[in-house]
Amino acid sequence: MGSSCKDDREEVIQAWYMDDSDEDQRLPHHREPKEFVSLEQLAELGVLSWRLDADNYETDEKLKKIREERGYSYMDFCEVCPEKLPNYEEKIKNFFEEHLHTDEEIRYCVAGSGYFDVRDRNDAWIRVLVKKGGMIVLPAGIYHRFTLDTDNYIKAMRLFIGDPIWTPFNRPHDHLPARKEYVENFVHKEAANHAVNTAAA
Ligand SMILES: CSCCC(=O)/C(O)=C/O
Ligand SMILES: [Fe+2]
């Protein structure tokens, strides 16, 4: 993508490095000065993203193609707000515990917004804001967490390959094969690529 051509995903997905303040988790938690993270940098961590037409998800050919290509046979919706989510307080607390899954976490925001925080290669938190129309895939084995923002509402489509397994493994679970594979593919290999590219520049 040329530098003059803005990536339209940036209108619905933005990412930045977080500060380490203990203030309300729903605040943006930008560093001072702000340190944004590009969608390409997220992809280097295995975090994939798309912009889709959230008003027409039933008939959206782009979503259909992604589901077919990536084998996302399962789909349901998760609405996070006190009125709609059973055991809201407990769920919100659990979502924000740092954890990993043994499969991809695939979320497509069809209304509202929320923050998916992911660890970078050096274990720093990157906050990923996903708004209506944003779809992200967190790879199996990446440490992450989720929180609502101050608007307190998200409706997300959840996708999965086959029968869904939602089990979170709270950190530390470094011995799991999914974690070892993640570290091999996205921490070690990507660190080596980065070193080569930096030396060549
Ligand atoms: C917006 S979907 C709720 C968050 C969730 O399902 C999850 O697994 C977070 O890590
Ligand atoms: Fe998760």
Image (cartoon, grey):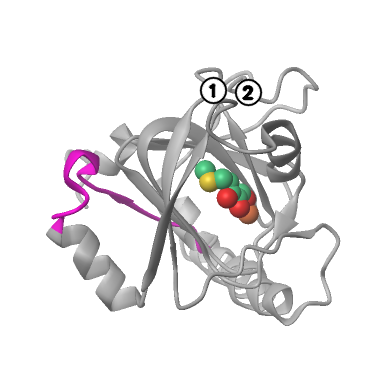
Query: Residue 41 or 13: which is nearer the viewer?
Result: 13
Query: Residue 200 or 113: which is nearer the viewer?
Result: 113
Instruction: Point out the frontmost of discs 1 and 2.
Output: 1
Circle 1 SS class: loop
- Residue 108's spot in the image, x, y percent? 38, 49
Q: Compare marks 1 and 2 and give the one earlier in the sequence.
A: 2
Name the residue that disc number 2 marks. Answer: 26
Residues packed near mark 1 inside 10 Å, few (<14), some (14 to 19) or many (20 plus): some
Vertical side of 40 occupied by 88: above or below: above
Residues packed near mark 2 inside 10 Å, few (<14), some (14 to 19) or many (20 plus): some
- Residue 127's spot in the image, x, y percent? 58, 37
- Residue 168's spot in the image, x, y percent? 72, 60
Instruction: Indicate yes or no whether the magenta region holds residue 49.
Output: yes
Vertical side of 16 occupied by 169: above or below: below
User: Who's the residue at 56% across and 18% down the image?
Assistant: 150
User: Who's the residue at 51% across and 64% down the image?
Assistant: 46
Name the amino acid type tagged 2.
Arg
* 156 on left or right of 3: right
* 181 on left or right of 155: right
CB-based contact (under 8 Å), mark 1 and mark 2: yes
Instruction: Indicate yes or no whether the magenta region holds residue 52.
Output: yes
Gap between marks 1 and 2 measured at Cα: 8 Å
Q: Give the quarter the ligand 2 occupies.
A: bottom right
Q: Which mark is residue 132?
A: none
Query: Residue 63 or 36: which is nearer the viewer?
Result: 63
Name the amino acid type tagged 1.
Asn
**Residue 184 seen:** yes
Name the residue that disc number 1 marks. Answer: 152
The span picked out in magenta is 46-60
User: Who's the residue at 61% across and 41% down the image?
Assistant: 126
Position of the C terminus by quadrant: bottom left
